Every structure is written in C-alpha cells, then in structure tokens.
Amino acid sequence: MSLSSGSGTGSTTRQRLGSLSPQSSIPLKILTLSLSQLIFAYDEPLSHLIYAGSDMILVPSMFEPCGLTQLIAMRYGAIPVVRQTGGLRDTVFDVDHDAERSESEGKGGTNGLTFEGADQGGMDYALHRAIDRWYGGGEGQEAWEDLVVRVMAQDWSWNEPAMEY
C-alpha cells in the first residue's frame, strides 16, 4: 500500500498494486471500493508512478528474503513502513529505535518506521508514528523533509560491496 498526499487539503489517497486469487479479491474489492483503487495486475510503469506519488509505503510482509519494494520506494522518496523480517529488517532502520544500528552499519541514518509481529496493533503503531511525522508532529515538517532527503541519498547498490570485495 502507498499513501500519497492529496491536493494540499490534508486529504490522502490510498493506492494498492498487487495480485490475489480471484476468489479472495472479490470481498476485498467490495470492502475497499469506496476507500481506494485496487489494481490486480503486474504493471511496472504504474508501480513507478505510485512510488513517485507516495509519501510512504506500507510493506507488511510475513516473509521477505530481499525486499526490493522498500528500496525502490526510498529512491523515489517514499518512506517505508515495514514489518521487521528478512531483507526489510536489513534495510529499514526505524527512526525512533534504530539510530545506533544504522550508525554501526554505516548507512547514514535512520530511514523508515518498523513494527514487529503480525498483529494489527503493531502495524497501527508504526502507521500512527509515520502519519504523525508526516503531519509534522513533534519535530515539525522539516523533520519529515530531512527524512525524505536522507532515504533518497542512501546507497543500496552493489557499488561499495563490490569495491570492498
């Protein structure tokens, strides 16, 4: 899921891109018809437009061996909100809890928000923290803008590991 800002009125638009079986998608389509637009197809150009228009991206994966979604989103300046698993945990450093881990891994600072477990409470907690930051809670809007700049500047390519090898 990605959240993108509306027309400056504080509104948000939810967009989802993914695939489900036809049987499981029918109830989901009915439930969210008035809240969002659902596209059940692989569409690479559309996915890049969604990344580019998003302020944050939610990746609640139960299993994620690598995690390209959050890496692509960060290049576009979308802040990842992810479940701590696999490659998501390796690449997303929580702004409230992972400053030391980020520093020790030399990634130039925190870059998103994370949650543990597979329960709704954990995901809600991370989303509330993200939305609060987006609205400028606590540190002001400049803190969100600094976070966006930081995630876009982080280098997750193979350039540095290849040189070290």
Image: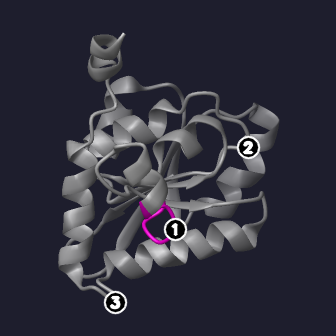
Q: Which is more toward the observer, 17 or 102?
A: 102
Under mark 2, the amino acid is Met
Element at badge 1? loop
Please report contact status of discs 3 and 2: CB closer than 8 Å, yes or no.
no
Q: Which residue corresponds to the image point at 34% horizontal and 31% vertical from the top-left?
A: 156
Separation of disc 3 and disc 2 at Cα? 31 Å
The alpha-carbon separation of the residues under discs 1 and 3 comes to 16 Å
Instruction: Identify the residue under disc 3.
Output: 138
Q: Are marks 2 and 1 in contact (CB under 8 Å)?
A: no
* Badge nearest the viewer, 3 or 2: 3
Q: Nearer the viewer, mark 1 or mark 3?
A: 1
Front-lying residue, 105 or 19? 105
Q: Secondary structure at mark 3?
A: loop
Q: Amino acid at mark 1?
A: His
Range of the magenta residues?
93-99
Q: Is residue 8 visible from the viewing direction of this image?
A: no
First in sequence, mark 2 or 1: give its number. Answer: 2
Residue 17 x %, y %: 51, 40
What percent of the width, then of the height, locates residue 149?
19, 55
Q: Residues within 10 Å of mark 1 (few under 14, many from 20)?
A: few
Q: Disc number at residue 97?
A: 1
From the viewer's perspective, is residue 48 above or below residue 145?
above
Residue located beneath label 2 in the image: 62
Tell me where residue 16 appears, x and y as whole percent.
Answer: 51, 48
Which dot, 2 or 1, sits closer to the camera?
1
